[in-house]
Image (cartoon, grey):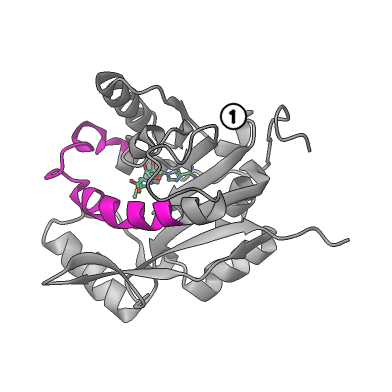
Amino acid sequence: MDNATATITTAGATIDPREAAHFGKLAAEWWDPKGSSAMLHRLNPVRLGFIREAIDAHFSRDSRTLQPLAGKRVLDAGCGAGLLCEPLSRMGGAVTGVDAAPENIAAARAHAEAMGLSIDYRAGELGSLGLRRFDLVCSLEVIEHVTDKAAFLAQLAAALADDGLMILSCPNRTVASRVLLVEAAERLGHVPRGTHDWSQFPTPEELQELATAAGLVLGQPRGIAWSPTRGLHLSDDLSLNYIVTARKAAPLS
Ligand SMILES: C[S@@+](CC[C@H](N)C(=O)[O-])C[C@H]1O[C@@H](n2cnc3c(N)ncnc32)[C@H](O)[C@@H]1O
Ligand SMILES: [Mg+2]
């Protein structure tokens, strides 16, 4: 397929209307670091460290370059109100943000405008938007909220240029994640009630299988762990949350 012009269209519905409604209700507070999306605000510096390193390695960029994404088309799938889209735009990328909740897209547009950033925000099903392919595709903390993980990964893979970089993150399905990320976090109000269905968290092995089926090769996952002294940080401990790169598998010749 011609990367420059061809549009991607993939079959399959991945949006759960109840999920879209749940996240849509959080839109007004999304950019408040102390509001209902506080956890995502806290995750941002940690995951941006991982993302920046992956960008520099994949696109052979100098780590001191301010705009390593200059000239690159970037997709953030399940972007919420744009917490990741904005830094990616500041890194020089031509960013498109897609989300299931129109309220989030409205909040994202308003915030980007106030920041003087130009980001293409779209509400709806990724595979139906007629977008062109992207050099960098991110989808962080989304796959545990979609109706069909295989269809969603197929949409992400279709959106990725052949030589592109993908970055995924999600919670792991472990005893620790059930106790801390679901029960304690929702009881203590760190995450809004009803945000997470633990049974939907993919383990790294399950994500690996889904990725392979979508024609993707995963890198080495890194944990996003928490400790009272260090807060959230990148770690070898994958038990709570993990982040991983992916690229397209080489076609069989
Ligand atoms: C936990 S939030 C994460 C937001 C953002 N990726 C971040 O990490 O800051 C999950 C987001 O995924 C969106 N979402 C859920 N299912 C989706 C789908 N099938 N396609 C696109 N967005 C979806 C929700 O509306 C919500 O905004
Ligand atoms: Mg989540």
Q: Is residue 177 above or below residue 148?
A: below
* Image x and y of residue 48, in percent: 34, 51
Q: Quadrant of residue 134?
A: top right
At x 53%, y 75%, the residue is 205
Depth check, front residue: 185 or 222: 222
Mark 1 crowdedness (10 Å alpha carbons): few <14, some 14-19, many ≥20:
some
> Is residue 45 within the magenta segment?
yes
Quarter, ligand 1 = top left
Residue 174 appears in view: yes
Q: Does residue 250 appear left or right of residue 252 in this picture?
A: left
At x 31%, y 80%, the residue is 175
The image quadrant where one finds the C terminus is bottom right
At x 56%, y 37%, the residue is 126
The secondary structure type at the circle numbered 1 is loop
Depth check, front residue: 156 or 220: 220
At x 68%, y 40%, the residue is 10
Q: Quadrant of residue 22?
A: top left
Q: Does residue 23 appear left or right of residue 75 in this picture?
A: left
Q: Quadrant of residue 92?
A: top left
Numbered range of the magenta stretch: 24-53
Q: Amino acid at mark 1?
A: Leu
* Image x and y of residue 141, in percent: 39, 54
Residue 80 appears in view: no
* Image x and y of residue 206, in percent: 54, 71
| Majority secondary structure of magenta residues | helix
* Image x and y of residue 220, in percent: 50, 71
> Is residue 155 within the magenta segment?
no
Report the residue marked by disc 1. 129
The image quadrant where one finds the N terminus is top right
